[in-house]
Structures are given as C-alpha cells and as structure tokens.
Image: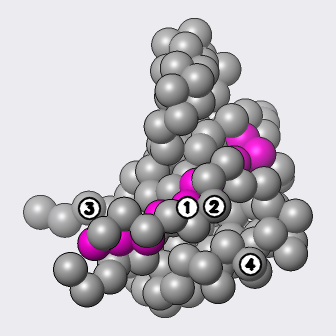
Amino acid sequence: MKIAFCSIPIADYDKALDFYAGKLGFLKKHDIPLGPGARWLTVVSPEDPNGVELLLEPNAEYPAMKALKEALVKDGIPWTAFQVADVRAEYDRLKALGVEFIMEPTDMGTTIISMLDDTCGNYIQIFQMTAG
C-alpha cells in the first residue's frame, strides 16, 4: 500500500493552480475534464514528479468542509505541510512573489517552520528538519 494522492480543498481551479504551480513551484500532473465545470486537477513536486499528487479538490463550499476550514484558520492550524531544504530561503523567495505569511520562520528545536496563506482559504506550513 502507498499514498498516491492527498487533497486540499479549493473553490477555484485556476486560482489554486496559479498559487500551487505559479507561486509554490509544483508541476501540473493531471488536468482531466470531468464534465461541466469539473476537473481532476493534480500537482506534484518537481523533486518527485512521480510521487504523491496533491489533488486540488473543489469542495471548499460544502457546509462541513467550509466549517472545518474556518475552524482551522481561526485556530491557526495548517491544512497540510510541505518539507523544504531551507525554510528561510523559501520564505524569502515566496515573499518576493507576494505570498502572505502568517508565521515567519521559527526555530522549533528539531525543525524550523513557517506558515503561509494559500489564497484558497487554507494555511500551509513549510518546514525544514534540523539536526536535533
């Protein structure tokens, strides 16, 4: 058994693709039409293009999902986390692209973390493992 994909709730395919590919630098893997207004849209890491796919899933407006997303944001909890080699360098790169951060790089002992707003109603954590 292996993890093939995970999903993140979005409301707008193009806005999400612009952020996840255009800003974060992921690669579009699949963009399959599924009928009027629906797509199977995934992105992957350029470091592992055959690895786990992130499904940009348009379920952000379902009442239960909307409530969950609002609660996570209210409590400052990220939807998911992405590992990077250098959090401070990635923070600087993304800030220069206009990405809004809600937490600057913070040393947590065995990791350095930062948190950003994905423009789709989710907080995303980036982290770097450090010697511990």
Is residue 111 a member of the stretch shown in magenta? Answer: yes
Task: Mark 2 vs mark 3: give the one in front.
Answer: 2
Viewer-closest of 106 and 122? 106
Q: Quadrant of the N terminus?
A: bottom left
Is residue 44 placed above or below 67 in the rendered structure?
Answer: below
View extreme (left): residue: 1
Amino acid type of the residue tagged 1 in the rendering: Ser
Instruction: Check disc 2 and report its element: helix, strand or loop.
Output: strand
Indicate which disc, 1 or 2, sits on the residue closer to the N terminus: 2
Marks 1/2 in contact by CB < 8 Å: the verdict is yes
Marker disc for residue 114: 1
Marker disc for residue 104: 2
Residue at 50% over, 13% down: 64
Indicate which disc, 4 or 1, sits on the residue closer to the N terminus: 4
The answer for how far apart the CA atoms under marks 2 and 4 are is 10 Å
**What range is drawn magenta here?**
110-120
Marker disc for residue 60: none
